[in-house]
Amino acid sequence: MKKVYGSTAGRATVALLAAGLLAAGIPAASADAAATPARIDLKVLVLDDGGSAVDALVWELKSIGLPYQTVKLGDSGRQTVDAAFLGDTVDGRPRAKFQGVITPNEIPFGSADSPEQTALATYEQTFGIRQIDAYTWAHPEVGLDYTDQNGGWAGVLDGAKTQITDAGKTGPFGYLDGPVVFEDNSALVSESYGYAGHPRDGYTSYLTAPTGGSLLGAYTHDGRSELVVTFAYNQYQEQFKVLARGMVEWLTQGVHLGQSRNYFAVHVDDVLAPDARWDTTLHCTPGDFDCAGPGGETSDIRMTAADAQYAAQWEQSSGLTLDLLYNAGSGEEWKSEHAGSDPLSDQLLADKDKFRWENHTYTHEFLGCVQNTTTVPWSCATNPDGSTQWVSRSDIYGQITDNYNWGVQKGLPVDRTELVTGEHSGLKTLPQQPQDNPNLAPALADAGVRWTGSDDSREPQQRPVGGALTVPRYPMNVYYNAGKAAEMTDEYNWIYTSKADGGSGICENNPTSTCLPGPLDTATGYQSYIVPQEATTALRHVLGNDPRPHYIHQSNLAEERIAYPVLDKVLGDYRGVFADSAPIVNLRQKDIGTELSRQTAWAQALADGKVTAYRIGNTVTVQTPSGVVAPVTAPEGTVKQQLLSTTVFGTPYAGQRSAWSSPDVFQAAITLKLPA
C-alpha cells in the first residue's frame, strides 16, 4: 500500500491550498478545480547539515544570484520546519515561501515519520515543490535497487567517464552533449565515491556510471519529485560544476532569479614591449631588483611578425578573440633601436581588426610610489618630511593618454574607458605600498578611464578607484619571463619544490601552496604537468559564472608559444562536454566590469532583503530597489510585459532565456509571461 505523508491537519491544509494549482500549471497531490492559483516565492530553502554536497549547491545558488534561506539542522534553537514556516496566505491567496528545497539526503530530519519530515512532504505535495537529495546511497527509498542487485556498483569514481542519458539531454541537462569525466588529480587520494543503482518504477536516470546504473536522476513518488544524487562532490570539482546548472534548472523548473554564463577572456599584456627572461643559473630574472650576478642567457623575449600572424590564425581556428594590451612607447623605442624597422608592429597593425585592443600605458612605467631600488626588496622613496613620494598625476595621465592617442592614430579599436596599468601599478601593492597612489584616481578621471585592471590574487573583489572600478584579473601560471617550455618549467620547479629538492622552498613557507613531490623534468614537465594544472584551474573559473579575465604576456606567444597548449586544453575540454547552446562568452573589459558591478549590486540587494519575486500561474513578478537590475532565467517562449505590449524576454543560453532586467517606463515591477 502506498505510504501517505501528512497528518489529518496536513491533509486539510492540502485541501484548502490545492485549489487553483492545476490552473497554475503546478502538480499537486490533491489538486481540484482551482479558483485561486497559489503564489510561489522565487527562493530556495536549504536544509544544511554542514556537508560538502550541500555546501556545493549553496555555492552554485550564490554564484548565479538565486536567493535562498538556510536552516542549519545541527543548530540548537533553529527554526522548526512546519506548515507555518513553509507557507501561509497573502492577500487571500495560498503562498509557498520556497520554490525548491535542498536537503542533505532523502530524510533530512532523520525519520520519515517525524513531524518536520511530514510537514516538508505535505508542503511539496501541495505546491508541487521539488527537492534535491544532495548526496545519498542507492536504495529503494530513493527509487534505486541496492548496488548488489541488477548490476549495481559502488566505489571510487576518480577518472570515471559517465554519460548523460537521453532523458537528461532532452531535460535539464540539454546543454551537455559529451561525457562527464570525474576528476582524478592525484593517484594518492580518492576524490569521489559513488553508488550506481538500477532504476525502479518512478525513477528517471540522467547520469549513468561506466558500469551501468544511475548516479543522478529524478524519483517521482507520492506526489513528490526528488533529484537523487548518489556520488560525493564538492564545489571545486569539475564534474559538479558541469552538472550544477542542470541541477538548479531541475529544482526550479526552469524559472528563477539569477543567471549564469560560462565566461573566458584572455588578456595578453606587454604587446609591442619586450619581456625579460628567467635565468636558469641565477634562478631569478636579470633586471629585477633582487637579481644580480653572472648568469647565462638573458636576452629579452619579444614576439615576431610570424608570432603575430600565428596569433591571428589561432583566433580564427579557436573561435576565441584575444585582448592585446599594448605599450606603444615601448614599441617605438624598439623601432628606434632597430633602424626604424619593426615588423611586429607592422603585422599587428595590418591585422588590427582581428584582435581586441586595450591601453596598457605608453612605456609600462610603475605608477605607484617612486621606487627606491637601493633596498631589497624595493621600498617607497620618501620626502625629507618622511612622506611618500608618489608618481605625479600628470605623469600618470601622460602614460594613459599618450598610449591611447597612439592607438587612435593607428586606427586601433581601442576604448578610452578601459585601462590596465603596468604591473597593476598605482593600485596598492603590499607590503611596500599599502594604499593607492592618491594621484591615480584623479588621473583616471582626467583620462576618461572607468575600468582599470587589478590582480585577482591580491584583490579579488571589484572596488572603486575614484569614479572608476577595478576589474580583477586571474594571473595564469604561464610566467611573463618565459618563452620556452624548459625555462618555464625550471622557474616552476624553483617556486614549487623544497630546498631539499633544489628549489627555493617558497612552497614550504606558503600556507596557500603545496610543494611538488620532486622537480619536474624540464624537457617534459610543462606539457605533462603544468599545462593540465593550469587548464584545470582556468576551466573552474569558466564554469563558475565568473567573468573575470585571465592574463598572460606577449612573451608567452613568442618563441615556443607556450600559452597556446593551455588555452587549447581549456577550450578543448570545454567543447568536449558542452553543447553549442552553451558557448563560451568572451567579453571585453568594460563589459566584464559591468557584469561584476551588477552581480555585486544584486548580491547586496538580496542580502538586504529588498527583492520580492514570485510566480502565480504563468506570471512572474519581480520587484527590486530603484537602480538595481535583476537577473532572471525563464524558459524559451517567455515574454516580458511592457506598458502596452510584450517583447521576447532575454537572450538564449543553455536552453533557457535569461537577462539582466528592470521595469519599463511607468512600471513598478518586472512582469514576465511564461509559456503555457
Image: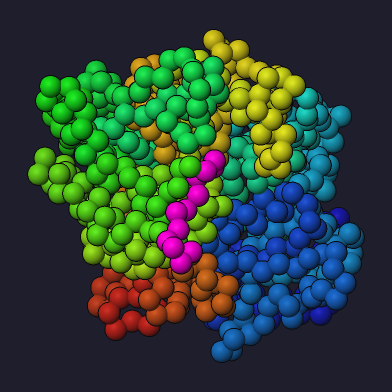
In the image, residue 116 above or below residue 106: below
The N terminus appears in which quarter of the rendering? bottom right
Which residue is painted at 31% across and 59% down in the image?
A: 392
In the image, residue 607 above or below residue 532: below
In the image, residue 121 above or below residue 204: below
In-front residue for pair 52/433 = 433
Q: Quadrant of residue 502?
A: top right
Q: Is residue 430 left or right of residue 123?
A: left
In-front residue for pair 163/346 = 346
Q: Is residue 14 magenta?
A: no
In-front residue for pair 57/91 = 57
Instruction: Tell me residue 436's x, y (percent).
Output: 44, 61
In-front residue for pair 222/229 = 229
Which residue is painted at 70% across and 63% down in the image?
A: 46
What residue range appears in magenta?
Answer: 375-387
Q: Residue furthest top?
A: 523
Q: Quadrant of residue 42?
A: bottom right
Which residue is painted at 17% across and 22% down in the image?
A: 338
Q: Is residue 332 left or right of residue 106?
A: left
Q: Is residue 300 visible?
A: yes
Q: Residue furthest front?
A: 384
Which residue is painted at 58% across and 43% down in the image?
A: 241
Q: Is residue 568 left or right of residue 346?
A: right
Q: Is residue 384 magenta?
A: yes
Instruction: Tell me residue 173's x, y (percent).
Output: 54, 42
Q: Is residue 553 left or right of residue 198?
A: left
Secondary structure character of the magenta stretch overall: loop
Instruction: Tell me residue 226's x, y (percent).
Output: 70, 53
